[in-house]
Amino acid sequence: MATNRQFAFPIIDSHIHLYAAEHLRDLSWAPSLPEGHVLKRQNSIAEYRAATQSQPNLLGFVFVETDRKSSMSKHDWQHPLEEIEFLRRIKSGTPREGEGHAPEDKDLLLGAVAWAPAAAGLPTLQNYLEQVQTSQDFHAKDGLVRGVRYLLQDKPKGHMLNTEMWKGLLVLRHTGCKTFDLGVDFRQGGHWQLTEAVQMLQKFYAEGHGQLKIVANHLCKPNLRPDVTQEDKAKWEHAVRALADLPSTYMKLSGLFSELPSQDPEKPTPTAELLELTRFEMDVIFDNFGPENIMFGSDWPVCNVGGPGPEKSWAHWVEFVAAVLEDRGLTDEQKARVWAGTAREVYELNVDLEEWEAR
């Protein structure tokens, strides 16, 4: 285990998903999972609390949309809008029976990254944002919605280069949105996804709209399998460097258990071995983004896929991240940025880290 000194920092989990059992029917990916799959069950705050009970320094989390069934048409927005209402009930401490959260859980939810039809075109996107009343949230210091995500990892080639896509980012910024979470999949989707994402953002920033902060999820899902080629590594590195060179871009240190070889719940992969398996990728993101632009995220409950199971995955990921920061010789100030400071700054969360550190 990591030492207590390594955990002498407040933690903001910048990337988790929540859904009650009754929400499974609304998730676009759930029907394809076999019965008994670790994700095909309720994963709400009660389950998250059970997974994180070993870490008293956890201040709270940022919820990220769960890819509910949706489309660019306003007739298909029911499920994402219901997800926002679910979050509002958590934040107000008014749970419905069976949702898996209690009134005292409201302070754990520090902010949310909601779904938005970013490629729908100006009038449609504006109409959606008006429906969820995100403008009020974006501008309020303690507002719920702190940014949006529109998954790109399942879209066809050329989608990100569509004019409506990068103009959608402009609409988000003008609406008051501070962040856009970037979800691409280098390993399963192909290196072109990351290349297109960089080109899309280069176009966006070339128009002089650098105020929107871009938060790349899960290291853009590099290939960490034993059959990875040096060519794959080089392509991923080249694209990540280009991403880091853009203004206002950040990286979530999250999601790698799903990309690594699956772990044995009875004998989790030692952190020393995980360090060696990911050393190249850690070098690339820390050398290019720097700890001031990297934030901790667990990707719970997806970390249970490939991780050592629901009882161990979250804690093992924390242990791994602590080992990464120690291995790189970061200062306490730099470690604090990764654990909580970057997430607070980027999502503009109403959290007093200084008060916690003074205790």
Image (tube, rainbow, N blue to C red):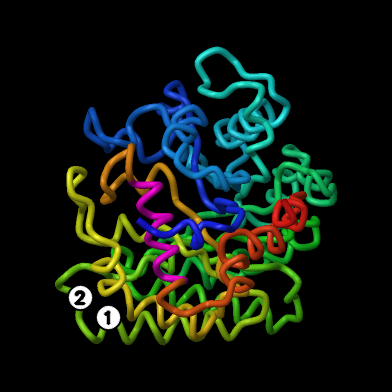
Is residue 170 visible to the viewer in this orientation of the structure? yes
Quarter of the figure with residue 31 = top left
Q: Residue shown at 24%/60% (left/top)?
A: 270
Is residue 69 visible to the viewer in this orientation of the structure? no
Q: Residue shown at 44%/72% (left/top)?
A: 326
In the rendered structure, does residue 289 fall within the stretch colored magenta?
no
Q: Secondary structure at mark 1?
A: helix
The residue pinned by badge 2 equals: 228
Magenta-drawn segment: 313-325
Q: Secondary structure at mark 2?
A: loop
Residue 211, x across and y down, in percent: 76, 72
Q: Residue shown at 31%/72% (left/top)?
A: 278
Would you place residue 305 above or below residue 248 in this image? Answer: above
Question: In the rendered structure, which amino acid carries the disc numbered 1?
Answer: Asp
Q: Is residue 264 left or right of residue 57?
A: left
Tags 2 and 1 touching, CB below 8 Å: yes
Q: Residues within 10 Å of mark 2 (few under 14, many from 20)?
A: few
In the rendered structure, does residue 321 fall within the stretch colored magenta?
yes
Residue 243, x across and y down, in percent: 53, 80
Would you place residue 246 above or below residue 142 in this image? Answer: below
Question: In the rendered structure, which amino acid carries the disc numbered 2?
Answer: Val
168 vs 93, nearest the viewer: 93
